[in-house]
Amino acid sequence: RSWLNRRQINGSLNRTPAGFYDRVWQILERTPNGIIVAGKHLPQQPTLSDMTMYEMNFSLLVEDMLGNIDQPKYRQLIVELLMVVSVVLERNPELEFQDKVDLDKLVKEAFQEFQKDESQLKDVENQDDMTSFYNTPPLGRRGTCSYLTKVVMNLLLAGEVKPGGEDPCLVS
């Protein structure tokens, strides 16, 4: 099966990786104004104060947010994006988002980066059709996750870097 077909099937079946909802919770903890996707806003507060990470209501709230996405392949790409955000935040505890995180905007920026590379490599004209992006494997040098990671890092580094308890750059 092509990656497009896999994303279509996984998105249609609402498949998510193991620990997905826990990771969304951890993203919310570092996103003061919440997450937006397909016009649906998942606020940090009162979500974190009213629920627990393992509560079924939280999982249903996340599913409700993802349920606004019309295309299964796009839903699966959003799930991949949330996993990328989770890994980036986990590995960089000093970073957090400054404002709402618009997942649609991040996917659009990742697609633009993908198109830039495609036009240089294959002399392909930019198009609005994301089929080639959906059909790209997630991992690898020019995989979708590399483009998603790039735009997430750009957004995080555009904000403030919060100092941790101990500055690793200090030499004493």
Image (cartoon, rainbow, N blue to C red):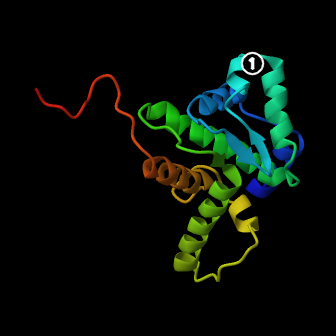
| Residue at the spot 65% in from the left edge and 79% down from the top edge | 126
Identify the image quadrant of residue 5.
Answer: bottom right
On screen, residue 85 versus residue 34, left or right, reads left
Tell me the element at label 1: helix
Q: Position of residue 125 (x, y in %)?
A: 64, 83
Q: Position of residue 113 (x, y in %)?
A: 56, 66
| Residue at the spot 74% in from the left edge and 67% down from the top edge | 130
Q: Which residue is mark 1?
A: 50
Front position in the image: 28 or 120: 28
Q: Position of residue 152 (x, y in %)?
A: 54, 49
| Residue at the spot 76% in from the left edge and 42% down from the top edge | 41
In the rendered view, would you say 12 is above or below 112?
above
Quadrant of the rendering where the C terminus is positioned: top left
In the rendered view, would you say 41 is above or below 61?
below
- Count of number-bearing discs: 1
Front position in the image: 85 or 138: 85
Q: Position of residue 24 (x, y in %)?
A: 67, 32
On screen, residue 140 versus residue 76, left or right, reads left
Disc 1 marks a residue whose amino acid type is: Asp
Badge 1, how many Cα within 10 Å: few under 14, some, many 20+? few
In the rendered view, would you say 15 is above or below 73?
above
Front position in the image: 14 or 160: 160
Identify the image quadrant of residue 99.
Answer: top right
Q: Is residue 170 visible?
A: yes
In the rendered view, would you say 84 is above or below 28?
below
| Residue at the spot 69% in from the left edge and 28% down from the top edge | 45
Q: Is residue 53 visible?
A: no
